[in-house]
Image: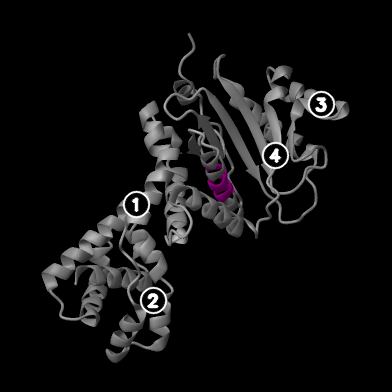
Amino acid sequence: MSQQLLEEMLKKPQRETAGADTNLRFDYQKNWAFCEMIKRHLEGADYLVAFEYHDDVVFMEPDEDPQKVDFYQVKTKKSSSNVTLGFYLARAKAKEGRKPSILGKMYENFDGIGAGHKVRTVLVSNVQFSFCGSNSCAADLKESDVKKIKEKLTDELPVFDEDRLNNVYFLTTGVSLDAMRSFLMGEVSELFKMELGEGHGVNMHAWTRLVQDEINRKNNIDSEGISSTNDLKLTKCVNRKFLTDTIQLVANNKTRAPDMTLVNAELKDAGWTAVDLMKMGKKISNAVSDYTNPTNGDAEQLKQRLEHLFHSEAPPALPDFLTIALSKVDTVTEGLSLYNEKFYFLAFAVIVFNEEI
C-alpha cells in the first residue's frame, strides 16, 4: 500500500529554488496563486495549497487526505513577446557542468510520489507560448517539439520517463504584470458574492490584504524545519476553510476606520501639521486591516501593548495618547520591527484609542 501523499511529499528532499527576481514578479506569483484558490473555491473544490514547498505553488485535493497534486512554476515577462520551448529546456553553464533546465527541475516533482496518486507539473506564464496554446499537455505538442524535449531531458536526467509528458502542462494566465492586482480584485468580488450575496458592504480590500499577508507568511517559512504532515498543513498551507472563515470574520467584525474628519480636527488643534496628518491618514487602511486580521499574531501583540498603555496611562485625549505612545514606540514595538514606522504606528494607535474609549 502506498503512503499518504503528504507523507511522501514530506520525505522528498527540497530542491533549490531561485524564486522571483523582482518584487513585482514575486507579487504576481502569489496573487496568481490567490486567484487559483478563488477559482477552485468557486468550483466547489476541497483544496489545500502550499507555498514555496518543492515548487512555487502546490495545490492538493482533497484537503484532509490528498490524492492528487499539482506543482506550479510561475514565470513572468514584462514584454509581450511569446515564450519559446527553448526557454524551458535551456541549461546555463555552472562551475561544474550545467545547471538544470526549468523543465528538468519540474520533472523532479514526479520522484518520490508513489502510484495511486495523480501528479501534474504545470509551467505557468503570463504571456503566450510560441509552441502551444494556453492550456496544453506536453505529450500533445507537435512531433518535433516532443522529440526535442525527449532528447534534452534524456541527456539531462539520470532517468527520463516519457510517459510523464502526459502530466506536464503549459498554462498561460492572460494577465499582464500590471493588470494582476485589478484582476485579483475582480475574482475577490465574485467570491464575496458567492459567500455573502449581493450588497454585502464588506471591505473586500481589507480581506484581500489579510489573505495576502497570510500567503506571505506561509511563503517565508523555511520548509526544511517541517517534520510532520500536521506541521506541513499548519505552517505552509492554506485551505478552503481558511477563505470561508476569514470572510465571515471580516463580515462580522465591527471595527472600522475612525472618523478621520474628527481625528484630524482634534490633532490639528493640538499642533499637528497638515503634512503629518496626510502621512498618517495614508496608513489608516493598512492599520485597520492588520488590527482586524485574526491570523496576524504580531499585530495582535501590538494591539495588546497599546491597550495596556492606554489603560495604564489613562490619557485624557487622543493627542496625549499619541504623544505618550510615540515616546515609548521602541518599547511597544520591541520584536515587532515591521510596525515601528512612525506614521503607521500612530495610525494603529489611533485605532486602539478609538476602540477603547
**Label 2: few (<14), some (14–19) or many (≥20) C-alpha neighbours in 10 Å:** some
The crowd level at tag 1 (other Cα within 10 Å; few <14, some 14-19, many 20+) is: some
**Above or below 261: residue 250:** above
Mark 1 or 2: in front is 1
Question: Residue flagged by tag 3: what amino acid is it?
Answer: Val
Q: Residue furthest right?
A: 144
Report if residue 281 lies within the magenta region: no
Crowd band around label 3 with a 10 angstrom C-alpha radius: few (<14), some (14–19), many (20+): some
Q: Which residues are magenta?
A: 29-37
Residue wearing tag 2 = 280
Label 3 vs label 1, nearer the camera:
1
Q: Earlier in the sequence, mark 3 or mark 4?
A: 3
Q: Exactly how many numbered labels are in the figure?
A: 4
Q: Please, what is the three-letter code of the amino acid marked with disc 1? A: Leu
Residue 249 - label: 1
Estimate the spatial distance between the alpha carbons at disc 1 and disc 2, rounded to whole Å.
26 Å
Nearer to us: label 3 or label 4: 4
1 or 4: tag closer to the N-terminus: 4
Which residue is under mark 4?
A: 171
Q: Earlier in the sequence, mark 4 or mark 2?
A: 4
Please name the residue that numbered disc 3 is placed on.
Answer: 146
Which residue lies at the image location 61% right of the left edge and 51% below the top edge? 21
